[in-house]
Amino acid sequence: MTTVDQPSLFSTLPPPVQSPSSLIAGCPLSDEALQTWKQRIVTFQHHVQTTGSVQQGNLFDDVTQITLPDWVRSAEVDSDNIDPFTLPQQNTEFWRWKINDVGIAALYFVIDYQATLLLYVGETVKSNQRWKGEHDCKRYLMNYVSAHRSLNLPVQVNISFWAKAPVQTRPRQRLESALIRKWRSPFNKENWEFWGTPFVGGN
């Protein structure tokens, strides 16, 4: 009898982290551990960028046929038209200078451009207000940047917006979910099982 493990999308990539606790939040990362964590994700995302859409159904073709609902397939097709790395960059503190402008419906991407690493995918109906105030991702970013600073490693975290997002909430959220699945952005909870949670702890 053949045992079927959950495969990675590409046979050349390292396997997913088996438990979100394999990298313990709040504990300092070594230079090697941080670089290895980043490189695994960069390698995956580079494959996505160069090969196009990730078809989730291909993961388990040897086990069972998975039929995706029409709205999932539609969102995944739409997600192929968005390359987060080509969008204009903004400082993550941008909202401080746009107090009177609530912004527009948008998808946004938090990226470490030094590593070409997409960290987080989000959606908002008010692009200039969503990042204001409390946001879990802001804490993860603070921990991420602090880890780099303590190890004297270069880091350049900025945010980019895709301004053609649907105004209606459900279609926009479906597109966000498709992009999270596609890029496996490590700060989105949906992907913690793949990469662990080294930057989630702290206040």
Image (cartoon, rainbow, N blue to C red):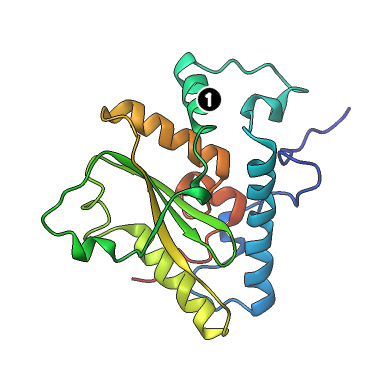
Image position of 117 (left or right of 146):
right
Q: Nearer the viewer, residue 110 or 25?
A: 110
- At 49% from the left and 38% from the top, the residue drawn is 82
Q: Nearer the viewer, residue 200 or 154?
A: 154
Kind of element beneath mark 1: helix
Q: Is residue 57 above or below residue 203?
A: above
Q: Which residue is mark 1?
A: 77
Q: Position of residue 58 (x, y in %)?
A: 70, 26
Question: Which residue is the extreme one toward the left?
Answer: 100
Image position of 109 (left or right of 103):
right
Where's the N terminus, which quadrant?
top right
Question: Which residue is the extreme one toward the right?
Answer: 1
Q: Residues within 10 Å of mark 1 (few under 14, many from 20)?
A: some
- At 20% from the left and 65% from the top, the residue drawn is 96
Q: As shown in the figure, which amino acid type bears the numbered disc 1?
A: Val
Image-quadrant location for residue 89: bottom left
Q: Position of residue 39 (x, y in %)?
A: 68, 61
Q: Nearer the viewer, residue 2 or 200?
A: 200
Q: Position of residue 34 (x, y in %)?
A: 62, 71
- At 21% from the left and 52% from the top, the residue drawn is 129
Image position of 7 (left or right of 164):
right
Across the whole image, how many numbered discs are drawn on residues?
1
Where's the C terminus, which quadrant?
bottom left
Q: Nearer the viewer, residue 137 or 131?
A: 131
- At 56% from the left and 85% from the top, the residue drawn is 152
